[in-house]
Amino acid sequence: MKLVETESLAADLEVGLGEVHWLLGGINREARLGMAVCGIVSVALSEALAAQEIEHELVISKPKLDVDPDKEHVFVLLKDDTIIDATYAQFYEYAGLNPGYISMSGRTRFFPHEKIATFPIGEHQKLVTQMSLRARYFMDHYEPVNELAFQRIDFKDLDEEQIAEQYAQIWEPDNIELFIPSDPTSEAGKRLADFILPEHVKLVD
């Protein structure tokens, strides 16, 4: 299955994140889904799906990335094994492209237009290829910002293929297991779900 209203759903989440998360209110709205908020966003999506009786699970990936071994990532897995990932853009941070950089530089054009990714589990190659090309292109055109002189760019010396290999581990089925959110994450996610309009959660085969 695939989401129909990805732009509208993304906008709902972006607005809601500015209201329910103490930090994100000051971040460029269009970049909020690029923050490490996968837990509360996925809980919000789960609430919206459950309201329409769409069967799904919350799952977590533990990819043990070379550049970030402790990184974990939460997203939604539908009963038909479709992944819905609304915060995949956070992984552009390894290329130096993050909401902080966007807010300081105003270079929003580098952020992906498609905010929410949907694809069958195990079929993530198209996404990771697009991400690796965008990451490498951004690094090749990176313009430092004085206020972010401390910023670390983990992918700096990697080519597109090496970057794609890193990204692929995030959605590799063997790295995915069920996720049980903490109480604070669950509560914040439920508040965020209030900003999602039911008509923006449409699925087609």
Image: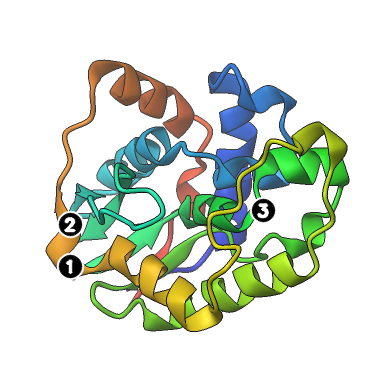
Question: Who's the residue at 50% across and 60% down the image?
Answer: 116
Left-right relation of 108 to 49: right
Q: Which colour scheme is used?
A: rainbow
User: In the image shown, does 117 or 108 lie closer to the viewer?
Assistant: 108
Give the residue number, with chain letter if any, for mark 3: 97
Quarter of the image for residue 48 reads: top left
Q: Nearer the viewer, residue 181 or 158?
A: 158
- CA gap, disc 1 to disc 3? 26 Å
Residue under label 1, please give it: 173
Q: Relative to 57, does residue 183 appear above or below in the rendering?
A: above
Q: Which amino acid does label 3 sit on?
A: Leu
Q: In this rendering, would 67 be left or right of 105?
A: left
Judged from the image, the secondary structure of the residue bearing numbered disc 1 is: helix
Q: Is residue 122 left or right of residue 144?
A: left
Label 1 amino acid?
Pro
Q: At 47% from the left edge and 82% from the top edge, which residue is drawn?
A: 161
Q: Is residue 2 visible?
A: no
Q: Report how far apart the C-alphas of labels 2 and 3 lie in the structure.
A: 25 Å
Q: Do the residues labelled 2 and 1 touch (CB within 8 Å)?
A: yes
Q: What residue type is labelled 2?
A: Ile
- Report the residue marked by disc 2: 176
Q: Position of residue 174 (x, y in %)?
A: 13, 65
Q: Residues within 10 Å of mark 3 (few under 14, many from 20)?
A: many
Give how far apart the Cα atoms at labels 2 and 1 are: 5 Å
Instruction: Give the mark toward the camera: 1 or 3.
Output: 3
Q: Residue at x 24, y 76 (%)?
A: 122
The tag earlier along the polypeptide, 2 or 3, is 3
Percent x, y of residue 163: 47, 72
Q: Is residue 6 above or below residue 145?
A: below
Instruction: Tell me the quadrant of the picture where the N terminus can be found.
Output: bottom left
Looking at the rendered structure, the secondary structure element under dot 2 is strand
Q: Image quadrant of residue 14?
A: top right
